Image: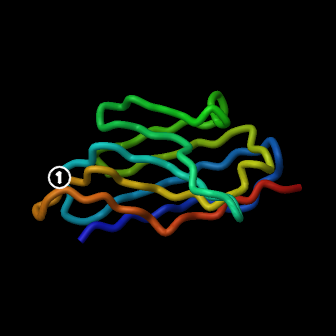
Amino acid sequence: QVQVVESGGGLVQPGGSLRLSCAASGSIFSIDAMVWYRQAPGKQRDLVARISGGGRTNYADSVKGRFTISRDNAKNTVYLQMNSLKPEDTAVYYCNAVGVHTPNGPLDVWGQGTLVTVSS
């Protein structure tokens, strides 16, 4: 069984920074990609940033230059460094581990989400 757990959310003032973490645990050989999504109240879930196993990254236009995604393959962990936060970044942030290779075959696994609130 594979679990994905996010951490690091909280309340921050506009212009501030937060660092989210997402750790996958269980019988894992490797993970193809790790992706951060976010969902604001009343809105759809949108991709924020994606990182491949080889380290290639993609970002939503709304966060380019402010957010940085990175991963530690040895720890099956992905990070999202969020700087210059804006009120519109307020959302529940979800981690998605894509192509998790296990003894029982590949899986896609979602975390429960962590709330980020940007407000003065």
**Is residue 69 rendered to the left or right of residue 73?**
right
Instruction: Give the residue at x 50% y 49%.
Output: 36
**Is residue 69 rendered to the left or right of residue 62?**
left
Q: Quadrant of residue 33?
A: top left
Q: Secondary structure at mark 1?
A: loop
Q: Horizontal and vertical percent for residue 25?
A: 30, 63
Q: Horizontal and vertical percent for residue 101?
A: 19, 53
Q: Quadrant of residue 41?
A: bottom right
**Is residue 112 rendered to the left or right of residue 55?**
right
Q: Which residue is mark 1?
A: 29
Q: Is residue 22 above or below residue 64?
A: below
Farthest-out residue, right: 120
Instruction: Give the residue at x 10% y 61%.
Output: 103
Instruction: Give the residue at x 53% y 65%.
Output: 113
Q: Observer-nearest residue: 90 or 77? A: 90
Q: Is residue 47 above or below residue 65?
A: below
Q: Is residue 57 above or below residue 105?
A: above
Amino acid residing under circle 1:
Phe
| Quadrant in the picture for the C terminus | bottom right
How is the rendered protein coloured? rainbow
Farthest-out residue, left: 103
Q: Observer-nearest residue: 52 or 20? A: 52
Q: Horizontal and vertical percent for residue 74?
A: 28, 46
Q: Horizontal and vertical percent for residue 53?
A: 30, 37
Instruction: Give the residue at x 21% y 48%.
Output: 30
Mark 1 Cα-neighbour bin, 10 Å: few <14, some 14–19, many ≥20: few
| Quadrant in the picture for the N terminus | bottom left
Numbered circles on residues, count: 1
